[in-house]
Image (tube, helix red, strand yellow):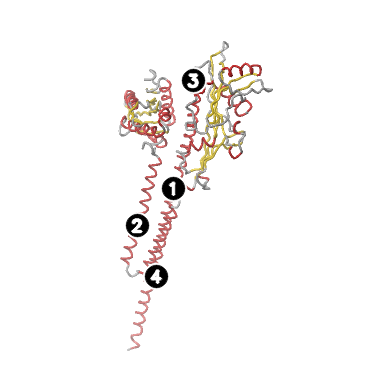
Amino acid sequence: MLAAHRPMVTVVECVTAGTARQRRWFGVVAVLTVLLAGGLASGGAALAAERSQERLAVQAMNMYQAGVTNAITDEVEHYADTLGDIAAAITTQPGLTDTQFQAMTAQLNTARLPGSSAINFVVPSSDQDVPATQALWRARGSTGLSPYRTGADTQHAFVVLSRTIAGSTPARGRDLNEIGETADTLRIARETGSFTLSRAHILLRDRTLPPSQQQMSFTLAVPILGARSATGAVNLRGWVTMGVRGGDFLIHTLQDQARGAVQVSLNDPQDGSEKPIAEVRPAPAVDRSDLVRSATFEVGHHPWRLELRPTTRLLSANGRQAGLFTLLVGLLVTVLLGVLVAVLAGARTKAMNQVDQATAALREDIKRRQEVEAELNVLAFTDQLTGLANRGLFYDRVAHALSTHLRSGDRFAVIFIDLDGFKQVNDELGHGAGDVVLQQVAARLRGCVRDGDTVARFGGDEFAVIAERITAPADVHATAERIVAAVREPIEVGGLTRPAVTASVGVALNRPGDSADDILREADLAMYTAKTTGKSRHVLAGESKGPV
């Protein structure tokens, strides 16, 4: 009998052993599956987070490039406008004296013109005219006038009146043609009849300073043109010049733009090489060639090249470690789940609940990061001061409007708005008051258009509007008039209600075959026409009746 039962016991043991092996293999397979799935999910989440942060870093560098370039060109234009105002004032004074010149320039200081050293009135002279020129300007009050220098070159450019801004020694009597960079600048200003900027150089008055205190600088010049001669040639009365130290200029210009997130270097391309003007290094740079941004632009008939490099501060602000953090968290969760599955292989339901909970937590973490990414995307396309769309978003909206209106046959308008008198608000009341004006103007522009229209701030004191579904030109005339009237209304600034600014408005309607650049350029030209024909008005591009 015992012998008869042996085969049955062997079968049971085999079945039991087989079941045990199956359970062990099931546990092993379950653990491996969890580890594999968790590792893949963690890697995928980390890769998605890393790519998201890379996109944000690229967008941030693009915004910094545009913002810094615009800030530098706007600041140079501010300096040029100041010199132009002084040149215009000198034109009205045929018998200009030193006292009058000092009064014209009394309000200029380094707070308004950071990096500036002195304002000079420069006159041309030949060798034979030197004594008469010297006697004339000494008689007009330039008592500190040093003896003029003469040389082989019969043409000179002498400083006859000078007002020091940064505490340097007055330059009266110096021949600016001694400096090759300045001589070229005066020549170009004379030939073009417009504002000119020199190549980078060390200012003559700074060359006596220790090398550690010297800064690479540049000179700005505006010609003063008199009446035409009998032959039709324009008589050159002289130039207004100003030397600007590059380091002080760049630091001031970038204090509201770079925010310490990028390294900025401003360079002067010369004869196939580059001469550094100034650089700002708020934090160590990161070796990321894909994020380096470079732009060459022209100011005052002279090219400048700008280079921006990301810093550790920028990448830290953009969550550079987000991908690694996500991966580590995901792997940690995966390992814990693997241990749980191995320990609780017999309690499958409970283990699966733990997996579901952990997976839900991981998905919630991914969702939260996606929400953060969406918020950062909004910030990337929104002007922080006014809450309006920025230049990049506005350009995309124009391109989209061209596509949709072409299919439907409808028309839309692009409206450019430039504030008249905004510079005076900043100069008289400060940048804080200027920000208040920009915010109130933004609110008024929203109230002048429909809900479906787009209002954007282009930068500085420039705004733009897309007015969609225009049935007739009269509609856009009415919208532009509302904008001009709304901006003209008094604004409360610094506790006082005053008529702060007006608006010069340019309007362009879309036409078949137009690109986004075409319609933006037409609106900009129309705005310029409005500004040069009286301001506080609007002009519709291509309309025969002219400014309204």
* Label of residue 317 in the image: 1
Q: Is mark 2 on a helix, strand or loop?
A: helix
| Residue 399 falls left or right of residue 266 | left
Q: Where is residue 96 in the image (x, y as percent from the top left)?
A: 53, 18
Give x and y (percent) for residue 218.
56, 31
4 and 3 marks in contact (CB < 8 Å): no
Taking depth in this image into account, of 71 and 545 the one nearest to the observer is 71
Q: Name the residue under label 3.
A: 89
Number of residues whose C-alpha sits closer than 10 Å to that of mark 2, classed few (under 14), some (14–19) or many (20 or more): few
Pointer 1 with pointer 3, Cβ within 8 A: no
For numbered disc 1, what is the local secondary structure?
helix
Question: Earlier along the polypeptide chain: callout 1 or callout 3?
Answer: 3
Q: Earlier in the sequence, mark 4 or mark 3?
A: 4
The spot of residue 267 in percent (x, y) is 56, 36
Mark 2 or mark 4: which is in front? 2
Q: Position of residue 310 (x, y in %)?
A: 49, 45
Of pointers 2 and 3, the one earlier in the residue sequence:
3
How many neighbours does mark 1 have within 10 angstroms: few (below 14), some (14-19), or many (20 or more)?
few
Q: 314 or 408, which lies in front? A: 314
Q: Quadrant of the C terminus?
A: top left
Amino acid of disc 2: Ala
Q: How crowded is mark 3: few (under 14 residues within 10 Å), some or many (20 or more)?
A: some
Label 4–label 1 contact, CB within 8 A: no
> Which disc is residue 87 wearing?
none
Mark 2 or mark 1, earlier in chain: 1
Residue for badge 4: 25
Q: Mark 2 points at which residue?
A: 361
The vertical placement of 176 against 63, above or below, is above
